[in-house]
């Protein structure tokens, strides 16, 4: 009779195995769709705002377009939110003035604040990381005030030594500046730091190219058989402790 393979959870990693690699001293974590189920929450809020669940894909496309303008320095976050709302409603045949667009964005955020929920693996992972002595930073591409309010609402801020928000720094992932700033604030080298996030490009590849260990949280399990060079893929945050302390195959960042 064969026994079931052992499973790793944040609770059952033996103490003597911790820091086996001795290399990673700090962990950066993305927030939206990594710790917080942003997509489900935002989709629900938009559906409540417009009464149409089918509007989500258009909202996503327009958000990607306007977020890229912010990252490129072409648009300020505050203006982006208003202009995105205008563009979204224009796609539905409704032209809004500035005041009406700002009002609807305000209402969307009110609805959003009622929807936030964490992924079930988020707090066990954060508890384990803190209990194991890793320095922790949140690295997020959101705007400042709303993101800090969200972190406070969900009691997430207390887990992090530092919170880096693109809307406050004026630059976001995949710009190496935000990753290097996080490492500097934590007092560690990039090579001693892993960054975990749901976006292959902005999170995992961006971190790798900045000299950190890039970990792609592929919750949907859509990773190709071999992730890009220097990237490690996991499908749950429950896999992170084992990766950090036991998996010696964690790829070495590609030299730049
Ligand atoms: Mg994300």
Image: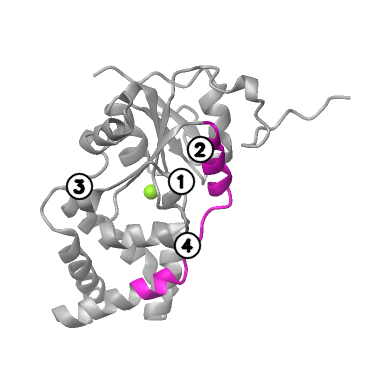
Between discs 4 and 2, the one toward the N terminus: 4
Label 2 vs label 3, nearer the camera: 2
Give the residue displayed 50% in from the left and 61% down from the top: 117
Please name the residue that numbered disc 1 is placed on: 159
Determine whether label 1 and label 2 are within 8 Å by CB.
Answer: yes
Q: Which element type, helix, strand or loop, lies under badge 3? A: helix
Between discs 1 and 2, the one toward the N terminus: 2
Between discs 2 and 3, the one toward the N terminus: 2
- Camera-side residue: 108 or 179? 179
Residue 175 visible somewhere in the drawing: yes
Mark 3 Cα-neighbour bin, 10 Å: few <14, some 14–19, many ≥20: some
Label 3 vs label 1, nearer the camera: 1
Does 51 sit above or below residue 184? below
Is the CB of mark 4 within 8 Å of ligand 1? no
- To which quarter of the image does residue 206 belong? top left
Please name the residue that numbered disc 3 is placed on: 169
Determine whether label 3 and label 1 are within 8 Å by CB.
Answer: no
Inter-mark Cα distance, 3 to 1: 20 Å
Please name the residue that numbered disc 4 is placed on: 40
Give the residue displayed 12% in from the left and 50% down from the top: 73
Q: What stretch is highlighted in magenta?
A: 109-132
């Amino acid at each position: 009779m064969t026994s079931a393979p052992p499973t790793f959870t944040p609770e059952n990693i033996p103490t003597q195995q911790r820091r086996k690699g001795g290399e990673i001293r700090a962990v950066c974590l993305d927030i939206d769709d990594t710790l917080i189920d942003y997509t489900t929450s935002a989709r629900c809020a938009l559906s409540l705002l417009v009464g149409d669940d089918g509007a989500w894909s258009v909202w996503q496309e327009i958000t990607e377009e306007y977020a890229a303008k912010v990252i490129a320095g072409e648009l300020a976050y505050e203006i982006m939110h208003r202009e995105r709302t205008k563009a979204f409603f224009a796609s539905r045949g409704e032209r809004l003035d500035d005041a009406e667009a700002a009002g609807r964005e305000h209402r969307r955020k009110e609805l959003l604040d009622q929807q936030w929920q964490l992924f079930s693996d988020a707090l066990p992972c954060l508890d384990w990381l803190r209990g194991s002595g890793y320095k922790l930073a949140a690295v997020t591409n959101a705007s400042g005030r709303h993101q800090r309010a969200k972190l406070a609402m969900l009691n997430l801020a207390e887990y992090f030594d530092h919170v880096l928000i693109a809307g406050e720094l004026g630059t976001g992932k995949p710009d190496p500046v935000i990753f290097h700033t996080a490492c500097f604030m934590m007092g560690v080298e990039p090579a001693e730091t892993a960054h975990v996030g749901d976006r292959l490009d902005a999170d995992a590849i961006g971190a790798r190219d900045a000299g950190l260990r890039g970990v792609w949280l592929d919750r949907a399990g859509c990773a190709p058989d071999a992730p890009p060079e220097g990237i490690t893929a996991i499908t749950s945050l429950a896999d992170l402790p084992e990766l950090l302390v036991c998996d010696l195959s964690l790829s070495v960042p590609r030299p730049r």
